[in-house]
Amino acid sequence: MTNAIPTPYEDLLRDVSEHGAAKGDRTGTGTRSLFGRQIRYDLSKGFPLITTKRVHFKSVAYELLWFLRGESNVHWLQEHGVSIWDEWADADGELGPVYGVQWRSWPTPDGGHIDQIAQVIEQLRSDPESRRIIVSAWNVAEISKMALAPCHAFFQFYVADGRLSTQLYQRSADMFLGVPFNIASYALLTHMIAQQVGLEVGDFVWTGGDCHIYDNHTEQVERQLAREPYPYPTLKIRRRPESIFDYEYDDFEIVNYQHHPGIKAPVAV
């Protein structure tokens, strides 16, 4: 991009578009792909909701709240007008032990469960210098039971100088449709957890494994990359709930979100 607004996502999107290797994939769609890339956002300088196309923040927020509820059924999402998981759900709305289940109730060999999110909050309060403040959705023993294996699989928190940073590892990165959504989701989670534990926000670091553009997204990517970005909006959290699990959608406000129009593209299921 030609101006001073940082565009790490768009820069990576262009890199994959111009230099990606042609590869097949599970869905049979075909992709252009690069392996092992990283981008970084300083969350104190704006909320990274992509501006070169509209990102539907309502869906981002409700999906994150659904994860934090520890649910495996899409009905709660549907009740709030969010349909992003419908393609993978069975006739009863079930997805199996996907993200939220692993975050909130990772099964233990003795028949118990570990609430990884509650554990993170406790660790950040009691031992913020720990290098073990980690959440994993990649439960090898339960992958086969999931409607979709976790794409954003593993994230770690880091505290320095009173600031909370997060790094996400995303093993499979749908650069056009998925990644803008994932960036906003984990940035929002970082803000929420920072508020809960009394820290300022630091960086959000996104690390991608297989970073790909589907062959049927090529035209949409070209259209997006032709657009000039706007300054990032800011996030306002209207209240501080008692718990990380007590946030509601109306607690969040995106301020000054100037964006280009949305660009539709098919989802590879």
Image (cartoon, rainbow, N blue to C red):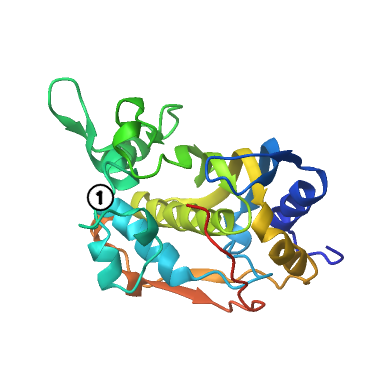
Q: Is residue 160 visible?
A: no
In the rendered image, the quadrant that contains the N terminus is bottom right
- Of the pair 118 and 218, the residue shown nearer to us: 218
- List x then y, in percent, for residue 5: 76, 64
Relative horizontal placement of residue 131, taking residue 251 as reference (left or right): right
Question: Mark 1 is on which residue type?
Answer: Ser
Residue identifier under label 1: 72
- Of the pair 23 and 60, the residue shown nearer to us: 23
Relative horizontal placement of residue 5, taking residue 138 as reference (left or right): right
- Of the pair 154 and 48, the residue shown nearer to us: 154
> For the residue labelled by badge 1, is the local secondary structure a helix, a strand or a loop?
loop
Identify whether 146 is placed above or below 248. Answer: above
Which residue is located at x 33 percent, y 32 percent? 144
Which residue is located at x 64 percent, y 71 percent? 53
- List x then y, in percent, for residue 89: 31, 54
- List x then y, in percent, for residue 26: 53, 40
Identify whether 138 is placed above or below 86. Answer: above
Which residue is located at x 27 percent, y 59 percent? 74
* Residue 258 sits in quarter: bottom right
